[in-house]
Image (spheres, helix red, strand yellow):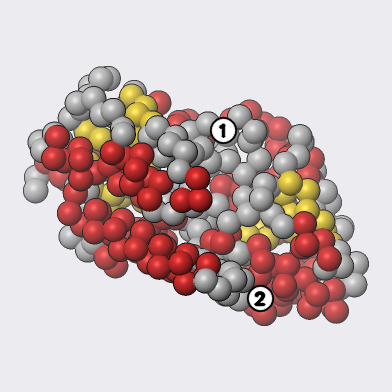
Amino acid sequence: MYTDTDVGWVYPAVGHSANDSDANYGHPAHRGFQERIDADPICFPDVPVGPLTHTLLKPAIEATRLDVPEYDIYVFENAESVYAATRIKRQYPDSTVILLAAHRVFGLESYDFASDQFPKSLVRRADRYSDQALIRRFVREHVDGVLAVSKHVERTVRSFAPETPTEVVHPYVQPAFAAELDGMTPSLESNHAITVCEGRDHKGVDMLVDAWEGVREYVPDATLSIVGRNHPEEYESVSGVTVSGYVENLAEEYSRASLYVHPARADAFGVTVLEAMRTGVVPMVTEATGSYPFVADVDDDLVVDPTTESIARGVVQYFQLPDDERQARSERSKAVTAPFVEDVKTREFESRFRSLLARLSTI
């Protein structure tokens, strides 16, 4: 199937973590997957491109400068790194290419173009449309199999690459942080909510902030803490909303809340949902969030539409629950998230990886 040296794992140039100042490449859970199968990391060079940084030209340029050793199997972390697929397939035509698919496979519904000024709105829409079209073309033409981080992602991939074999692999909470969260007690008696993410369109924090005025009409003492980098300070102009940015003690921030809200327009999974649940903080997510089936296992009412109105209704409905019902949902949250630990999920990843390779060997 594979040996210790014949799998290369291709990472984009930019790391991923909402509240990790040391993140340098890859999602932490994805690095765990890579280490489980003894794959060698191959990182895109971080090429300065000035005003083109947030366009498709950055990964396209970086892919041309990537030094690619020969491997039998290449795993691409997220769709951004799939810009290198054409070159790798041309250089090593007998190699097997696997995509670990996350949010970049989603379409234009991930983005908030309405807040962009003209002509930026047109330029960014055109760039994102082209990025989506190229990624989907690369997947159809050069990717042999897909490991999707949720059923939500798998359905999306099947919508544009129905012939490509897929398996689902779930991420997990990092071990040291899981232990820290286990020692926390949520503030279930409070009407305090938290959301943790980077300030990116697909996370939908703007919709949550827009919803908060409506929440306060019914729950006047409702407060919201936004944790993570790159959120606009003007969010704090809404009563009850604070923007914390990077925090030193994220576990403590979770413990101050009774509700975690993940208001995504389109999110592959949302590990922060698991983190909050592990603390005993009750989660509420949109149905466009990959972890929503696990939140629905706590309570179907905690899964809402990705709209300002639906998010506001969901928050108000939770804050109006009596203490005993909040406690029951908190306990179910802890139970649901218990299996999402490194040893369990990395073993599951290895099993699904082997299964996908076995399926590909019969094609």
Q: Is residue 165 above or below residue 206?
A: above
Q: Is 73 on the left or on the right of 328, as rendered?
A: left
Q: Is 167 on the left or on the right of 339, as rendered?
A: left
Question: SS for tag 1?
Answer: loop
Distance between the alpha carbons at the discs numbered 1 and 2: 31 Å
Residue 37 in view? no
Amino acid at pointer 2: Thr
**Residue in the image at 19% along x and 49% along y:** 142
Residue 167 versus residue 238: which sits nearer the camera? 238
Circle 1 or circle 2, nearest the eye: 1
**Mark nearer the N terminus (1 vs 2):** 1
Q: Is residue 247 above or below residue 164?
A: above
Give the residue at mark 2: 308
Answer yes or no: do the residues labelled 1 and 2 have beta carbons within 8 Å? Answer: no
Give the residue at mark 1: 23
Residue 154, percent from left and from top: 35, 58
